[in-house]
Image (tube, coloured by chain):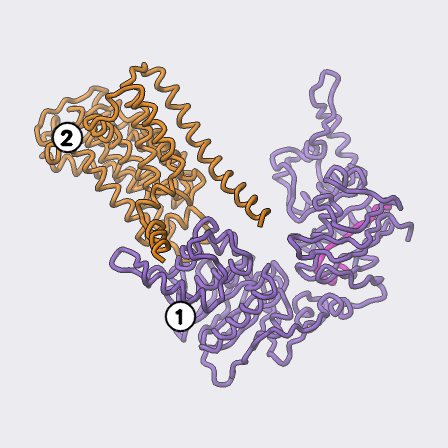
Amino acid sequence: MGQTVLEMIGIKKSFSGIYALAGIDFSLEQGEVHALLGENGAGKSTLIKVLGGIYQPDEGTIKIQGKEVKINGVPAARENGIGIIHQEIVLVPYLTVAQNLFLGREIKTSIGTIDFKEQNRRAEEMIASLGVGIKADSVVETLTIAQQQMVEIVKAVSFNANIIVMDEPTSSLSNEEVEQLFQIIENLQKKQVSIIYISHRMEELFRISDRVTIIRDGKYVGTRKTSETNPNELVAMMVGRDLESFYARDYCDMEKAEVAMSVKGLTCDGTFEDVSFDVHKGEILGFSGLVGAGRSEIMESIFGARPYTKGEVYLKGEKVHFKNPMQAIKAGVALVPEDRKKQGLVLGNSVAFNMTLSSLRFYMNGIAISEKKRKAVIDEFSQKLRLKAASPDIEAGSLSGGNQQKVVLGKWLATKPEVLILDEPTRGVDVNAKFEIYTTINELAKQGIAIIMISSELPEIINMCDNVCVVRAGKLVGKLKKDELTQEEIMKYAAGGVE
Amino acid sequence: MSENKKKSVLVNNPVVNMFRGNIGIVMVLILMCIIISFATDKFLTGTNIISVLRQISINTFIALGMTLVIILGHIDLSVGAIVAMSGTLTVGFIVNQGLPIWLAIVLGLLIGTATGFISGFVVSTFKVPAFIITMAMMNIASGIAYVYSGGQSTRITNEFFINIGTGYLFKVIPLPVVYMVILIAIFAFLLNKTKFGTYVYAIGGNREAARLSGVPIKKVEIIVFTLSGFLSAFAGLVLCSRMYSGQPSVGSGYELDAIAACVLGGTSMSGGKGRISGTVFGAIVIGIISNGLNLIGVSSYWQLIIKGLIIACAVLLDVQKGKLSGLKKKFVKKNA
């Protein structure tokens, strides 16, 4: 390989005291495809945002072509030859490809109007040079996602980018489109463009990358030549961390436990298919897999928040099909959603308001809500969950992440569920609150509540669950018992590539 | 101990809370009252105060419904047209069709209520922006009023009917003011003490969270628009009675007065926030502006300009209030 084009040394970045990046080293050589690998929350996106000028690092240096540079904004990144292809397409849908490529730097005619002819001609040239089959005058909206992504790449190259970052570029592409993308990547390599490639998919990394750098918990773990490593080694590097000691769990006696809910062949076309599992009273059933594998969608369908096309759900032996969340709640199913700010809380309203929103039917005195009954419940759960809020009347949005999550948890416990579905129950929560949430979950399981826990944090899955289902691309690809649970085993199923 | 007790009584007192929660608008109100009462001694008299209350009653009826609609995160532009349609039809049914008064009133209210129901149904089922659908309903309702009446106003002299809008309770309090007080009480109860009210706030505050919490969004939306339609129809009935006639041209611009009352009262146009007491203060402020300016003898053309300026200032003040308390928090934190 050629000379080093980019060097990032000791990059640190913290958000309100918590390190997202705790000293990352990364180097990129000319013309190489360098994969960046790490679990969700490991710091990949933060690192890319530092490179793209969206975040400023607290410490560390960035060198481009050996010269130290400060990237203090998106234009600065562009000037330094860095182009970033984000997961979301950022093109104007109603303009043509050429118009998008020249947006903000239009080619003018002598009288000051836009020279569409020249723009189209130049755009065709740019597109052809990368071997992409798209017409310059087609409207972006009419293109497929893959084609739009290619337009983005063309655009990045047109700004003379010699470092291109691709953030999970294949996440919404079909196999055929992935092949096209790889073709383009090879063409870019021939032009001596260097590529930072972020993906979870092992098979892709082994096909196209020259080197792989693994980061974990915001720290640099190591760099390997792709030809000299194997998926198992990479997975071990990705997840290998000490088992933390704060998981409190009294396992459930699976032999004696009754089935609380049973799902058979649940299918929603295009999202997930043929999902079957049982969850027992007192069991914690984990759902592992990569983000976007369809875990949340499966649970939302069971809960009535999203339709499903085929399959059956049985609750204590009786067939149910919830048309909306209200029916599910009344039947004793609760779902603590993944995104507490968007789906869990009405942030502008009080803690009391949020905590009792789903269970108001228990506090009615005729048509009026009895404040007394309501307050009793709020007190009960504030205490049980060790909620730290100055008063139940303060805005939920003013609490810390951990306490917000406790409010959401309290809201669902107040509905007196028999089946409790937790979607990423400890995401964005500090260590203390995590411990308290684990303790609560364990208590609930002991009381005989059947718990389904979706989590992307493997230690949490391994140390809390009786059984684990692994989901990949909308399918249940593995079911593991608690004594079979290791991070490597789960990642093998979740990422695929190793059988 | 007794100090603490006193404090907690103050904190928990709903009347005190009502003023505290609407501090911005209450300040504007007091300031206006002081200025006007210096300018004219006719302002702070019993008869004038009662007359102001009577004048604001129609706007308050409509604004109560509008408050719910706006908290929900929507808007209802059809209210003014429903006032005209329901009023014109009710009077017409009595005078032209010779229907019994009670039947005509029921029909008039029903038609207005149905209009609101349709708006709510379309908004919640087809996810059409309420701005568009209620604007369409505004045209339809207004058109119906003109088509039915041929553009003419219809006089009515029936004593019972006239009494609805012009009568008095105990010979002092105008009946519209009585209705107003009753409706304010009902709506404050609905919004603060019932499941329905809680759901309205939840939907406006975070629709997705409300849906996942089992809130029946569609039902609540339909009920809110239906209530708005009913209140507008009721406003139409009272207005006709006070004018001794059904006129298809009344009611235009009422939607804007109602929205202004809500916004003045601190209801957030993006939904999720607002209260009945705020809206009532808002309606009072709007009422006092025109009353005060009339008493001082400002021409009605100038009144429009002044009214606009006061509304803009009051809202600016309210926004600043939020910023100020934010700044204060920061400052306190820094020092602590």
The residue positioned farthest toward the bottom in the image shown: A255
Q: Quadrant of residue A107?
A: top right
Residue holding disc 1: A319
Judge whether A416 appears above or below B117 on screen: below
Local secondary structure at mark 1: strand
Instruction: Tell me the magenta residue range.
Output: A192-205
The subunit letter for the residue under badge 2 reads: B
Local secondary structure at mark 2: helix
Residue holding disc 2: B93
Residue appearing at x 73%, y 22% in the figure: A108
Q: What is the quadrant of the C terminus of chain A in the image?
A: bottom right
The residue positioned farthest toward the right in the image shown: A2
Do we see residue B136 in this rendering?
Answer: no
Colour displayed for chain B in the image of the structure: orange
State the image coordinates of residue B170 (x, y, percent, origin top left): 10, 35
Do we see residue A13 in this rendering?
Answer: yes
Magenta run includes residue A466:
no
In the image, taking residue A148 as reference, residue B12 lies left or right, namely left
**Count of labels in the image:** 2
State the image coordinates of residue B244 (x, y, percent, origin top left): 15, 24
Residue appearing at x 70%, y 46% in the figure: A55
Residue appearing at x 33%, y 28% in the figure: B286
Letter of the purple chain: A
